[in-house]
Image (tube, helix red, strand yellow):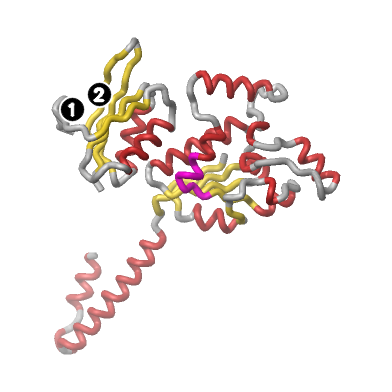
Amino acid sequence: MTTTILEVERVSPRNGAATDIQSLAERVAALEAQLAEVQSRLPKDKVTIVVFSGDLDRVLAAFIIASGAATLGQEVAMFFTFWGLNALRRQRKLRGKKLTEKMMALMTPADTKGMGVSKLNFFGAGALMLRQMMKEKNVTSVEELIELCATLGVKMVSCEMSRDVMGIAPDELRPDIEVGGVAAYLADALESRVTLFI
Amino acid sequence: MGVDLATLAVTRELDVTGLKCPMPLVKARQEIANLAVGDVLKVISTDRGSVKDFQGWAKAAANVELLGQSEDTAGGKTLYIHFVRRVR
């Protein structure tokens, strides 16, 4: 700001008033352009979450943060990749898949109900126990949270590359999701105040 | 905050007792959307975390103001009460 004032004073009077005004107008225009540039680079009220894990507890944390952020008036985008895609699964299909893809499909959960916990899973017993304990404590289930996030306008994006690698057919996932890649995530993350990798 | 909670005119009361994070906040957010600007919502919760959560909500969201918080007990349970005003 100080610099601008000094610059203005340095405009010599012998150039005439018209030139002064013209050079001032040019300076204002240049400053406005710079301001617009700075503003466009400021983070927005946005939260971006990468869901890499398909563990029930981690996915639960991701959706609690997402629903909380949406409630606080933030624009929320969630990107699901690799095991995280299991959180978007609606069904399991085997038809038309290669052997490795079929094996992968059988070894991963068919839907969110089949997700295990990150610790003490014991072939699903840990997950059942956690769900039971959550129910007793009246904590919202992960399925309810996903639906809640969808109604709150949380954007859910499935990573196309990892979906393809894992051999998951598009119709095995929720129909209300978007499809994207690394640039889709980065475009949102670069203008977010908060970005998480879960 | 300087608001006398006892004499505050409350537009609507929301009972979220028994609900856990993030539901008290989500329900309050849905309820305040139905109120007019200037209206006051009283939220009654049993979630201890809701005290900080409602402070965070008021700090992060431009459309609400936290007028005050208080505690009460009912049936051996502590109630956390929040008074929120819609400002836009």
Quarter containing the N terminus of chain A: bottom left
Q: Which amino acid does label 2 sit on?
A: Ser
Range shown magenta: A148-155
Query: Secondary structure under badge 2?
Result: strand
Left or right of B63: which side holds A43? right
Q: Which chain carries label 2?
A: B
Q: Residue at 32%, 43% (x, y): give it.
A: B33
Answer yes or no: is residue A142 visible.
Answer: yes
Crowd around label 1: few <14 · some 14–19 · many ≥20 (10 Å): some
How far across and down, in percent of the image, does residue A126 sit?
65, 22
Looking at the rendering, which quadrant does residue B27 occupy? top left
Task: State the residue at coordinates (34%, 71%).
Answer: A33
Q: Position of residue A174 (x, y in %)?
A: 62, 46
Quadrant placement of the C terminus of chain A: top right
* Residue A150 within the magenta-colored segment of the rendering: yes
In-front residue for pair B42/A119: B42
* Front residue of this view, candidates B77 and B12: B12
Is residue A162 in sight in this rendering? no
Q: Please say if B37 is above or below A184.
A: above
Q: Where, by quadrant of the figure, is residue B21 drawn?
A: top left
**Is residue A29 rendered to the left or right of residue B47?**
left
Label 1 sits on residue? B5
Three-letter amino acid code at the position of disc 1: Leu
